[in-house]
Amino acid sequence: MQEKVHVSGGTALSEQDVHSGEIFMTEDSLDCAFAWDTGVAINRYLTELKNGRIIATECRHCNRIMLPPRLFCELCFKPSSGWVYINDTGVVNTFSICHVHWDASRIKEGEKPYLPAVIEIDGASAGMGIMQLLGEVEPEKIKFGMKVKAVWKPENERTGSITDIKYFKPI
Amino acid sequence: MSKRVAIVGIGYSGFRTTSADLSYREMIFEAATKCYEDAGGIHPQSIDSFVASAEDFMEGISIADEYVPDQLGAVLKPVQTIAGDSIQGLASAVMQIKTGQQSIVATSAFSKVSNLSHYEHVAAYATDPAYIRPLNEHPYFIAGLEMNRYLYETGTTREQCATVVVKNKYNALANPSAVYGAKITIDDVIGGPLLSAPLGVLDVSGHLDGAIVLLLASEDKARELNDKPIWIKGIGWATDTPNLDSRIEGLGTAVYAKLAAEKAYAMAGITTPGNEIDFAEVDDTFSYKELQHLEALRLCGPGEAGKLLELGCFAATGDLPVNVSGGSLGVGYLHEANGLQRVLELVLQLRGEAGKRQLSGVETGLAFAWRGVPTATGAAVILSNRP
Ligand SMILES: [Zn+2]
């Protein structure tokens, strides 16, 4: 099969041809910075993460405890009914074992794979959870429905970011 | 295809230079809630589909489309985003109803430009990377080139352009949603700092955050939802070549506006727009654009807009009030949401709900939006309170 593949005439361009100026390219890099207003709901969520707590909002119309918290219920289309603190424990809904970094470069020999997971948080409505990393666990030991707990950064290192939770570990 | 389409709900929020207290989701939710309440308290479950207008770079999110549903009540519904001015999005919503595909459609647009640290970078990225961007100029230089050529070709004066600013900022004083209202003089505008001559700082509209949501319905549903439906009589849009140096009729003329309006006029059965349009909300991103656009839209003859403006024809009290809302110069510049801001003013006026700035006896209005430099895209819509 392979030898039948026909490449039409000419010589393929190499990366070097591009960099040496053999062919014309025009280069420019985008320099644009954003600072997004987090708004009422996410502002409170991040503030509470800094305090080492997870907060959700409640919709009394559809009886959901919504996480991450939102100011309105996207299903009932009504303002949320109030705030509720929930636990920092939950179960693994789904997970993946990542062998590449964000830029698709492969992890190095001996480097541990990243373990992103959706954690259904105890106290939030079924199926509602947060995206986080798993830690202190061997990839092959991760199970669906595995009970986990948040491992927080020390208080003085928290910044009001989702990374104030370092990862979730099995309990 | 003959189905009539009406605007049956309007809602808006923000209209401030910053809106740090609300996320874009929360700001749009407020506008959507007001819109649905205005349409007889409809629940979004009863809305068939949703059309947003947005530009990813302005929001700082690739595929901003995917972030549309929640705040409109559009989860698990047909949703699409038009990368264009919100009158282009409105056109898409109208077509969904005209084809019989949907009966009730919401359309939305918003600006959170205050979240963009350097608008200039995004604006610069709109120019061609090979043969414009290396000149390394602020993209407003294109407006300077357009203005200069327009003045040269038509004999319109610098003072007449400044009069647009004076008029629109004055009109804005009667609009509680307008943040750039002011009582200034022609000398203030001309004597202000220059940007790219002849364009000065005061010739340019200022940025604004805000969200607008409209609800559209087919004729059979419209009267159930609102006892003052505002009818879409005609809509059109057009784009010229992107080549700044070889626009079909040069930089002095807004051909895109002419073509967009002719489509809308034909659909509305309008042959003499100057007589049949009672008032207009027309793009005034830059002062000269209002005059250039009025001529392209055939609301006056070529080269006449400046003189008619001086005679007071386009004032709120004139024969053809233009930008009685204050326009972009008075209300503020909402980027892709500009079109819906102009449509919003039309609806308020045609319903008789425009408060202190209410025009008397208006039946038919035209809104025209342009996508700003370096684009040559315009969209026009004609609304009436008579079906
Ligand atoms: Zn709910």
Image: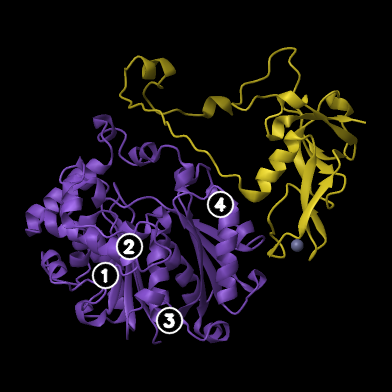
Tell whether B103 sits left or right of B187.
Answer: right
Q: CA distance from mark 2 to mark 4?
A: 23 Å
Quarter of the image for the C terminus of chain B: give it.
Answer: bottom left
Q: Indicate yes or no: mark 4 CB to ligand 1 under 8 Å.
A: no
Residue topped by disc 2: B327
Residue B272 figure quarter? bottom left
For badge 1, the amino acid type reads Val
Q: Which chain is purple?
A: B
Closest to the observer, A32 or A54 = A54
Label 3 crowd bin: few (<14), some (14–19), many (20+), radius 10 Å? some
Label 2 crowd bin: few (<14), some (14–19), many (20+), radius 10 Å? many
Residue topped by disc 3: B351
Indicate the secondary structure of the residue bearing disc 2: helix
Indicate the secondary structure of the residue bearing disc 3: helix
Label 1 crowd bin: few (<14), some (14–19), many (20+), radius 10 Å? many
Q: CA distance from mark 2 to mark 1?
A: 8 Å
- Which residue is painted at 32% across and 27% down in the image? A26
For badge 4, the amino acid type reads Tyr
Q: Earlier in the sequence, mark 4 or mark 3?
A: 4
Return the x and y of residue B147 as percentages of the image width and height: 17, 51
Residue topped by disc 1: B322
Q: Indicate yes or no: mark 1 CB to ligand 1 under 8 Å.
A: no
Q: Is residue B369 visible?
A: no
Residue A164 figure quarter? top right
Q: Colour of chain A?
A: yellow
The chain holding disc 3 is B
Closest to the observer, B24 or B237 = B24
Residue B338 figure quarter? bottom left
Residue topped by disc 4: B24
For badge 2, the amino acid type reads Gly
Q: CA distance from mark 1 to mark 4?
A: 30 Å
> Is the residue under label 3 in contact with that under label 4 (CB below 8 Å)?
no
